[in-house]
Amino acid sequence: MHLRRLLLLSCLAFAGFAGAQSVPTEDKPMIGGGGAIPARATRLPASASQGAMVIGNTHPAAIVEVAGRTLRVTPYGSFVFGIGRDATGEAVLRIKQPATGWIEHRVAITPRDWPVENINGVPPATVNPPPTIAERIEREQARVVAARARDDARTGFTQHFIWPVQGRISGRFGNQRVYNGTPKAPHSGMDIAAATGTPVKAPADGVISFADPGLYLTGGTVVLDHGHGISSNFLHLSRIDVQVGDVVKQGDVIAAVGATGRATGPHLHWGMNWFDVRIDPLLVLERGK
């Protein structure tokens, strides 16, 4: 009878492990009898959607490469990369642990449908800007791109992200945008409708890498670096409460909703990036469910 009970408990424990997520939800050590024990088996999801943020786990001393980039690996073995809106096929990773040669891992990319959004009433100069304004936009965009290029060691990206504001989703990531009848680039983030002045909170820990109240297209703009190339950008802000270099915690107020720049009404545009790859904030939020 005692032996049967032990066998039953062992089966239940194995079933609970098998049903768990394939990647860690926060960057914490696994504790064994002798202290912190780093993971050695590489863990990755079998598939991920276009626009996804993918977190894997491997040996802390491993070398991880994807898309021509060598990734940071945390002391607990976590690493992260993004899958672009238009990516197809598979994401191919090469991982070399201290005791192994290079091993290839593949993550199948799940395609999504991208509806068309028609947006009218936008100031014409923001849709087809004259040459002098176009040059200004290019200079401003270069500054934002530089802020997104940081590769910081912090690990805010491993947290369960929270909504920066509560409100109706008025624009979705990836949808094709048509302004005043003119097709433009796909939407790079998620729009959340909210009243002007509504506090904007940090969705996860990070450091402010960019803050400017007056960009031509995006108005008040803040970039929050969550580490390892993952960043959030908040656009059309009416107020900015932080400066470059400020370290913020999840839930801290960093700005206020507005309608500055190319906007037809008050809302928060929340975009996310893995370096220059745009990812979907809604998918990042759903990771924590």
Image: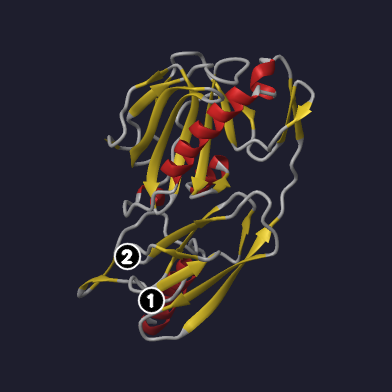
> Circle 2 is placed at which residue position?
76
Q: Position of residue 42 (x, y in %)?
A: 46, 73
Q: Position of residue 17 (x, y in %)?
A: 45, 68
Depth check: give the residue in front, 206 or 277. Answer: 277
Depth check: give the residue in front, 244 or 12. Answer: 244
Left of 149 or right of it: where is 276? right
Residue at the spot x=57%, y=43% of the render? 280
Residue 63's image quarter?
bottom left
Depth check: give the residue in front, 71 or 283. Answer: 71
Residue furthest to the right in view is 181
Left of 276 or right of it: where is 224? left
Is disc 1 placed on a helix, strand or loop? loop
The amino acid pointed to by label 2 is Tyr
Residue 59's image quarter?
bottom left
The amino acid pointed to by label 1 is Arg
Query: For the residue carrying disc 2, how many other residues have a C-alpha within 10 Å: few (<14), some (14-19), or many (20+)?
Result: many
Q: Is residue 201 visible?
A: no
Left of 158 or right of it: where is 83? right
Query: For the residue carrying disc 1, how many other residues have a C-alpha within 10 Å: few (<14), some (14-19), or many (20+)?
Result: some
Q: Position of residue 70 (x, y in %)?
A: 44, 66
Residue 14 is tagged as none
